[in-house]
Amino acid sequence: MHLTLFKAALKAKNLRLVREFELLRESTKDISWCAAAWWRDGEEQLTIRDWLLVDAWYRSRALSFAAAGDAMVPCIDMANHAQGEGSSAFFDRDAEGNAVLCLPNDKKYACGDEITISYGDNKSASENLFSYGFIDRDTRFTTGLTLDLAVPEDDPLKDPKESVSTTAPAVRITSKDDSVKWESDFLWLACVNEEDGLRFEVFNTTDGSRELHVFWDDRDITDNTGNLTKLIEDNPIWEVFQLRAVVSLQDRVSSQIVRLTNSTAWSQTSQGSDVNPDIRSVAQRLREFEFEFLERTLESLEKEKVNLLESEVVRSFLGGAILSEQ
């Protein structure tokens, strides 16, 4: 998955699983039967590879029920996936809350037909690959992806912004009916500055330690920087903040397109190497899906930027900034 967005997600997942495994060991090493079965004589009978396998089993078999969450259901969780109308059955809950496999009345079945369910028609190609290890053969495009973000290096508030953020440093981009939308609380924090109303203060606590707090227009938002999004929407220069976010996101999307373009060279040089052909094929499909999606996103962001530049608020703000520089 070299240079695709899947690489970052996989790295983050592996780090999380390593932390979980270490927590499991620390929490159970002094329990007699766990120590005997898993950590006998200082030798790990249970390894991180076992934990990775358990996670793969769970992710690939767990079913998601509305209002009930995830569950492991014998037999049903062994059903293979088929997308959309291709699935021959679906799972639900009965009046008593039990998981049941339902066969639609409008479908006909013959002896020996495979019973399939949908693992989620609205899931993107990368989500299916992440959870189940495959991309549906009928998938022709991806419906969303997540890009990691960072505060620009030249931002004097880079360190405190990243320190106080309570939201993931990422942006989620989705597409539906030719409309591209994006969402990121972190991006708004990265795009506002002291002159806009953002302020940081260090407080001394009763135990002698120090805490960094962040304020927006004198309102303490340290415990939930995600509130910043709603707060700045009421600001008179909200459209200016939008323009900053769009331009910043354009740069991030463009840089990812360059990375994917470079991955073409890797795909060509990997031919004939020890890379599994099936893995190479899946990686190439994912790269193509991501590339097409990012190009559409870039076009949408450009339209959004052009519309914002026509705003009287933005024009007035930019005009004042130019006069200040002169």
Image (spheres, rainbow, N blue to C red):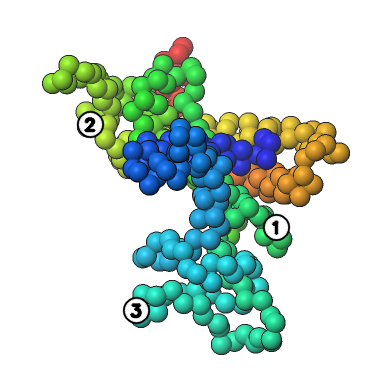
The crowd level at tag 2 (other Cα within 10 Å; few <14, some 14-19, many 20+) is: some
**302 and 201: which one is in front?**
201
SS for dot 3: loop
Q: Measure how far apart labels 1 and 2 are at the Cα level.
A: 46 Å
Q: Earlier in the sequence, mark 2 or mark 3?
A: 3
Of the two numbered discs 1 and 3 in the rendering, the one whose residue sits closer to the viewer: 3
The crowd level at tag 3 (other Cα within 10 Å; few <14, some 14-19, many 20+) is: few
| Residue under the point 46% across and 64% down | 72
SS for dot 2: strand
Q: Is residue 204 left or right of residue 28?
A: left
Q: Which residue is mark 1?
A: 140
Amino acid type for the residue under numbered disc 1: Arg
Q: Which residue is mark 2?
A: 220
The relative height of residue 138 versus residue 267 in the rendered view (above or below) is: below
Q: Which residue is mark 3?
A: 96
Amino acid type for the residue under numbered disc 2: Asp
